[in-house]
Amino acid sequence: MIYVKKSKYIIILILLIIFNNPSYAFEKNSYFIGHPYGYHGNKHIPDRSLKKFLTKNPPVFILFGGDMTENESNFQLFYQYFKKFNFLAVRGNHDGDLFSKIPFWKNKNISKKKIFNLDMNSDMKFDKTILGKKNDTIIVQHYLWYLRLFTDIPRSSSANNFKDKIILKVKRFFSLKIPLVNSMYASTILEKKQIEKIDFGSNNIYLAGDCGAYKDRFSYSKTFYKNNVFICSGIGSVWANHVINLRSLEPIFFDVNGNIITHSCKKVDGKFQNIIEFCLPNHINSKKLWKLLR
């Protein structure tokens, strides 16, 4: 059932005021682009729909969320096109030794906004204590290590005895069965109790770039938790390709010809007393995914 309590609307309004404050504003046409190589097996570098969109809406700044090319050996093709733009990129699982090809960066200031590269390997292990020291910062990564803020799948299968298996089945019955990303590369997923213990800092924007690579999954999701915004986004579904407007944190969906198309968003209650927002283009393929939110 889709609903939002009145008190939660107030929280969202306050956070929107904070994050839309002019002191944090990016210039027009500043984008976050996750999974920019597009769909699996895509031979066009860069993705044709993305290239057409950027031609029609020239970017002032681009923040890439990893997986620039499906094959790391093709990165120079990607770079030859994008080197004319002002961009930063984080490393995805398809990028190999990305920072042997472009300069490594950890902290940057763009349009008076602090950006932090939460670089990590596919095991998704990093020093979580550094997050508590961050404030008013965009924290960008490829992996959706905070997956549990959005969904309970892929599910853990750690139950070994009959009692644990029954408990797990009950939990699954009440789970958020919302498809976002793949199996997280067999990495250990941080579960609810682990996430609740993390100090995420204050007034930060967490951007993950590994959503959107499949046709049957949500490509844009956003939530508010512990005074921070968490987003997962990316292209690759073809029909739900989009970039994120870094001024508003809202998605801009476009079709195969790079034309901006209308979209709709819906909200559900998460398991952390958080509100989760999902957005999809107004497309026939959206109907099946919207049904999952009921």
Image (cartoon, grey):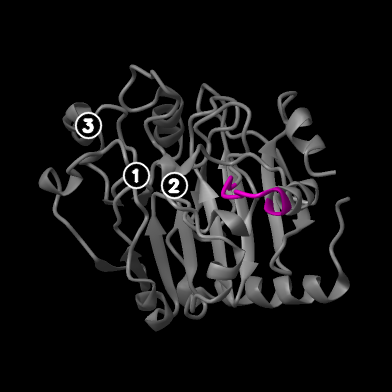
Task: Name the dominant secondary structure of the magenta segment.
Answer: loop
The answer to whether residue 137 is above or below residue 142 is: below
In the rendered structure, are the residues bearing label 1 and label 2 in contact, judged by CB atoms less than 8 Å apart?
Answer: yes
Q: Amino acid at mark 1?
A: Gly
The answer to whether residue 153 is above or below residue 112 is: above
The answer to whether residue 45 is above or below residue 130 is: above
Q: Residue at x 73, y 31 (%)?
A: 286
Is 144 on the left or on the right of 43, as rendered? right
Q: State how far apart marks 1 and 2 are (Cα).
A: 6 Å
Is 6 on the left or on the right of 257, as rendered? right
Answer with the quarter of the image where residue 262 lies. Answer: top right
Q: State how far apart marks 2 and 3 are (Cα).
A: 17 Å
Badge 2 marks a residue whose secondary structure is loop
Q: Mark 3 Cα within 10 Å, few/some/many (few <14, many 20+)?
A: some
- In the rendered image, residue 3 lying in the magenta stretch gets the answer no
Q: Residue at x 39, y 36 (%)?
A: 36
Q: State how far apart marks 3 and 1 are (Cα).
A: 11 Å
Q: Which mark is residue 72?
A: 3
Extreme residue in the left direction: 100
Q: Amino acid at mark 2?
A: Gly
In the rendered structure, are the residues bearing label 2 and label 3 in contact, judged by CB atoms less than 8 Å apart?
Answer: no
- In the rendered image, residue 160 lying in the magenta stretch gets the answer yes
Q: Which mark is residue 137?
A: none
Answer with the quarter of the image where residue 237 lies. Answer: top right
Q: Mark 2 Cα within 10 Å, few/some/many (few <14, many 20+)?
A: many
Q: Residue at x 39, y 72 (%)?
A: 128
- Choose the circle earlier in sequence order: 2 or 3: 3
Residue 90: x and y, percent? 30, 51
Residue 241: x and y, percent? 54, 33
Q: Amino acid at mark 3?
A: Glu
